[in-house]
Image: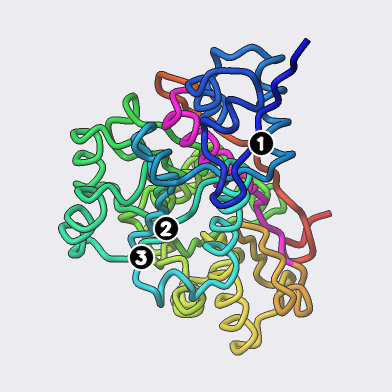
Amino acid sequence: MICWWPIMPKDRPLNLEDIALLAGVSRSTVSRVINDDRYVSDATRAKVLAVIEENGFTPNPGGRMLMTQRVQAIGVLFMLSPNEAFEDPHYFPMLLQGVNEATRQRDYTTLLWLGTEDEEISFQQRILQNRLMDGLVIASIGGDDPLVEQLLKRKVPFVMVERPAQRAEHINYVVTNNVKAAQQAVSHLIEGGRRRVGTVTGKIRHVDGQDRLEGYRLALQAAGLPFDSTLVAEGDFSFWSGYQGAKRLLEQGIDAIFAATDRSAMGALRALREAGVKVPDEVALVGFDDLSDPVMQSQVPLTTVRHHIAKRAELATELLIDLIEEKTEGVHHIVLPHELVVRDSSGMP
């Protein structure tokens, strides 16, 4: 009996045909395994993967792109200037950390786009039309931004990490329930005996800012307290808007402040300290994000809403890749849990 063993070439890298010969399967079967096709038996998949690992085979990215029509790249879109995106050293880096964790696990790369609304035409021409990415994770986009409509029209896969302001039934998203979370935070202040509760909002044009303001209003309503527009200081999620907002609210005789972010709460704390106001004895303070800033915690441990920023981005990216690879279908709406973390600044046990 004569046995034939395949002899692999030594003067060139292995290709799909070589792997197929070693595994005793067809070239198309190797291709399906590499592209994670679900219509491959577990035994065949295991055999092909073992040969790939044993030989250190890396698929040719150009050939893979031609076959799958994918570039294996995820875009992360922040409609912000670089200064805005990285003024907060925690929030957006945590979002990127979550995206990166998912793309690393799924063998995708990440492209980051920072820009303002007036740069959207450039984004569409340079990125979308040239197919530089397979889909998008979108954060910090205005509620009336026309880009969402363009993405739906072009059938570009995307997942938002904020609640869509319109056409939510057609849009995939992974979010925190900002309305309920803010309502819980303000109700906590009211339960502590505070009756002049002011708020420093986020960007009102953004859905997160709108929802946290709505939660503030609902908490007052549930407690039978009137909504007073003089107790609302419009901000933009930043430290300095919290600082300026707290100064204005002090003029209205407030006894508590709900800040739309921890960064704003830090700004409010500075304004209160400069004015000689004791926290929480005279004015209680609650933030949102639980970023555990060491500067804030060293001054007065902050009561805040904890939501899982990195996990939200990671799940959104996993969902996006599943949509791109057609492993799921339909529209997905995922709402992650939150919790109120009570510390010293609210004056409540």
- The Cα atoms of the two marked residues, 2 and 3, are separated by 10 Å
Of the residues under marks 3 and 1, which one precedes in the sequence? Answer: 1
Q: Can residue 68 be seen by looking at this rendering?
A: yes
Residue 114, numbered circle? 3
| Residue under numbered circle 2 | 111
- The Cα atoms of the two marked residues, 3 and 1, are separated by 38 Å
Residue under the point 43% across and 48% down: 74
Category of crowding for the residue at label 1, using alpha-carbon neighbours closer than 10 angstroms: few (below 14), some (14–19), many (at least 20): many
Q: Position of residue 286 (x, y in %)?
A: 64, 60
The verdict on residue 323 being magenta is yes
- On-image quarter of the N terminus: top right
Query: On the picture, is 140 further left or further right than 311?
Result: left
Classify 133 as above or below 294.
Answer: above
- Magenta stretch, overall SS: helix
Residue under the point 74% across and 75% down: 294
- Disc nearest the viewer among 3 and 1: 1
